[in-house]
Image (cartoon, rainbow, N blue to C red):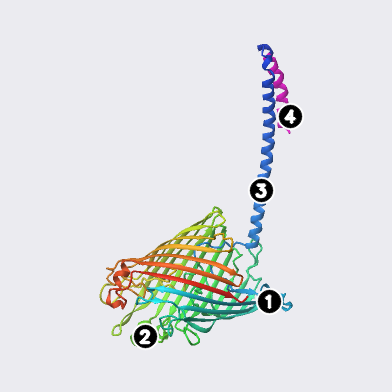
Amino acid sequence: MHTKRNLSFSKKLAQPLLISSLLLSGGFAHANEPEIKLADNTTQTTKSIEDLEQEEKVRARLKEIADEAKAAAKTANGYYVERRSYGTQKESEPPRYVKQANKTWLKDYDAFNDVNWLDLGLEYRARYEHRDNDFRRADENIDDPLLLRTRAYIGVKEILDPLRFAVEVQDSRRNNGDYSRAYDTRDVNQADILQGYLELHFKESIFGKDDLGNNRPFWVRGGRLAWESLDRRLIARNEWRNTTNTFQGVRANIGDKKNDWQLEAFAVKPVQRFTRSLDEVDHSQDFYGVIGDWRGWSEYVTLQPYYFLLKQDGNKVKYNSNGQELTGATLSAAQIDRKIHTAGLRAYGAFNSGWDYDTSYVKQWGNQDRFLSNALGSINVDHEAYSYGAEVGYTFKNSWKPRVSAYYGVASGDSTPATGTDRTDSQRFERLFGFARPWSNNDYIQMENIRTPKLHLEFEPKVSFLENVKVDTSFSWYRLDDASDRWQAGSNLRDRTGASGNDLGKEVDLRVRFPINQYASLNIGYAHFWAGDFVKDSVKIAGNNNDATRASSSDFFYTELTLLGF
């Protein structure tokens, strides 16, 4: 108000002074023009200040609205921020194919209208693969297997709280392949139990609430368990593979993903898969772990510290990973004692600008037996290994949601003397029970003895006749961390002299996923691998029992159909 009065007074004072000046100078002919300009300028100044004040009010209100929306979103989602890094999204619990009964087609029946305490799931997956010169095999061949997997789930929650329970079964088969199915638990595991547990679940616990008012629940489960943790590289169900990792023991959890902090602990034994008989608990191994999630420090940083302990009693080892009973020298080589400690820290987050990141460092230590020969037996050596990785991505503000990212990952290898028995310490990273596919869509890389940079592109094209299409493509360069150690996924190729070098190869892959309807989806993919000097040279070493004349590249194509019952 004072500003307006001052401007009005200045206008009244300026006009007579200006007219007097013009009279003295004899400038009557031009007196009106400057008067008009002055009036216009004064009016314009008044409007500008009013406009600025109004704009400031609008900006302030818009900020209030944005802050209110942000606060409402945080209240709804809690502290949780979804990771964007490639291939690290964990399977949910219960799995994604499971639905609440009253949110399925059963809701059309009156009896199920209010049934929110029953979880049901039925999934059938069929994947046709075409593999030309598959380096996982010792010989060059064209293989066209048909992989079939059926899952069913039933769970009861809330109605009997704190008591809950769930059962999940799975049948995995392979048809039309060129290789024996008798001992291949990567693809075959007929009619077995993935999960079967009892749970005590307390929505409100002694651990109180977080600063947003979210309850911090507590639950403990006991029985047959299958789950995923961290970035899936150390503990995973292995959703891509036709068979699934599972354990038997106890899991406990404080909090959930809405809370500012969460803590998980477990004590389990791995379950040994068999192709045609019921799976058995592997009594030779014990696996313990504690995993933390700290989300309260910053909305841009989630910290995950963790510790695992894997113990193996060599005297109780009976089978290899494919469920084949071991005998003779093979049994002696497998019956080793191990105690492997694994500690790590992961940090990930996303920024409003479109940038995101995911980084981790893992250290392993302990001791294990190293088998020398039947005559010499085994010696106990120290275990010292490590792994680290980092991914940085950027999502563009576009309707296709394109995201580009770069990743670099390392898992240490085991240095081996060129000749004689190996009495050195163990340095090969123990990959535990993780998911290997983020390393290679060809399934050629596991989390050991590897160094790889990767480039990713992901986007969701807007197609008029098809919704929710997702496309991703990657290019990867693979090098062995230690040239004298093995390429385990590549049929255990090895050059103990290191003369074949570190160059493992390169890979390009493409994947397209899209739903047909709410009960069916299709996944189509292709990957091409160019073998490096290590592969080309080491296949010629007689001890590797590999096809020395095989081609130096491979092709992998697949098409996968998934059907849901609910």
**Residue receiving disc 3:** 62
Labels 1 and 4 touching (C-beta < 8 A): no
Instruction: Rate crowding at label 2 as few (under 14), some (14 to 19) or many (20 or more) other CA atoms within 10 Å.
Output: some
According to the picture, the residue beneath numbered tag 1 turns out to be 106
Q: Which mark lies nearer to you, 2 or 3?
A: 3
Q: Earlier in the sequence, mark 1 or mark 4?
A: 4
Name the element at disc 1: helix
CB-based contact (under 8 Å), mark 3 and mark 4 = no
- Name the residue located 49 percent from the left edge and 87 percent from the top edge: 277
- Counting from the top left corner in percent of width and height, residue 521 is at 56, 70
Q: Give the mark, 4 or 2, whose residue is nearer the N terminus.
A: 4
**Is residue 7 left or right of 508 when viewed as pictured?**
right
Could you tell me the amino acid type at mark 4? Arg
Extreme-left residue of the structure = 419
**Label annotation for residue 331:** 2
**Sequence-earlier tag: 2 or 3:** 3
Start-end of magenta stretch: 1-22
Secondary structure under tag 2 reads helix
- In the picture, measured across the screen, residue 209 lies left or right of residue 174, that is right
Q: Quadrant of the N terminus?
A: top right
- Residue type at tag 2: Leu
